[in-house]
Image: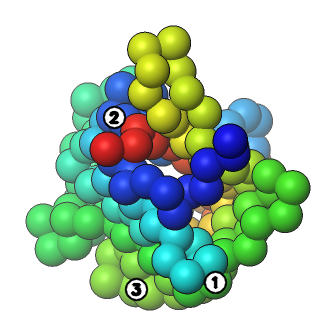
Amino acid sequence: MTRSISDFTWQLDQVHSHVGFAIMHMGVSSFTGWFSGVEASVVERDGELSLAGSVHPRDIVVKHEKLHGHLQGADFFDADDYPDITFASTSVSVEEGVIDAVGDLTMKGVTGPVVVRGRISEPTEDVAGRTKLGLSLAAEIDRTAFGVDWNAPLPGGGLVLADQVSVTAELQFVAS
């Protein structure tokens, strides 16, 4: 018997979920980081799927303590004044496991549209008998459109940071 997403209430599995980002740094390679705390929901009602999620700038994980502090300040996330980065879908379509969502991203007090694309699994029983659901999502955002516009010129031309940021989310949910 095939079960539908709407047959369950889903809770995010924190251990198996991850939101990360990558940004071109100095024109030579991508700098990556991730958020240690993730909140997310997936709900299907009357055949309509909705997605929502948030991360907290204070929970950003990068390999340099001084950079972590800089990212908390006004040059980047201004975490004291804007403690959450949120996404809420406005439309979601799924066809043969491919998910396309349009929604509102709010970061640093600015809300704007973002397109998210990826894959969604069917509800699947794991080895412990729990029903799981997986989402693999990706989006490209222009960080400057959300007020995250710090940059510096490089001596040979160009800028330290690109404007485009790749955001990925690997989310696993458990039926409750």
Observer able to see residue 79: yes
Image depth: mark 3 or mark 1 in front: 1
Of the image marks 3 and 2, the number of the one nearer the N terminus: 2
> Mark 2: which amino acid?
Gln
The vertical placement of 29 against 21, above or below, is: above
Observer able to see residue 158: no
**Where on the picture, by quarter, is residue 81?**
bottom left
Residue under circle 3?
110
Residue 47 screen position, x and y as percent: 62, 77
> Mark 3: which amino acid?
Val
Residue 24 screen position, x and y as percent: 68, 46
Residue under circle 1?
91
Question: Which residue does the image show at 56% across and 57% down from the upper left?
Answer: 5
Q: Residues within 10 Å of mark 3 (few under 14, many from 20)?
A: some
Question: Which residue does the image show at 26% across and 35% down from the upper left?
Answer: 66
Is 71 left or right of 132, judged from the image as shown?
left
> Mark 1: which amino acid?
Ser
Residue under circle 2?
14
Q: Mark 2 and mark 1: span between their CA atoms? A: 25 Å
The vertical placement of 171 against 46, above or below, is: above
Q: Mark 3 and mark 1: span between their CA atoms? A: 20 Å
The vertical placement of 137 against 107, above or below, is: above
Q: Secondary structure at mark 1?
A: strand
For the N terminus, the quadrant is top right
Is 168 left or right of 39, judged from the image as shown?
right
Q: Secondary structure at mark 3?
A: strand
Q: Mark 3 and mark 2: span between their CA atoms? A: 27 Å
Depth check, front residue: 56 or 98: 98
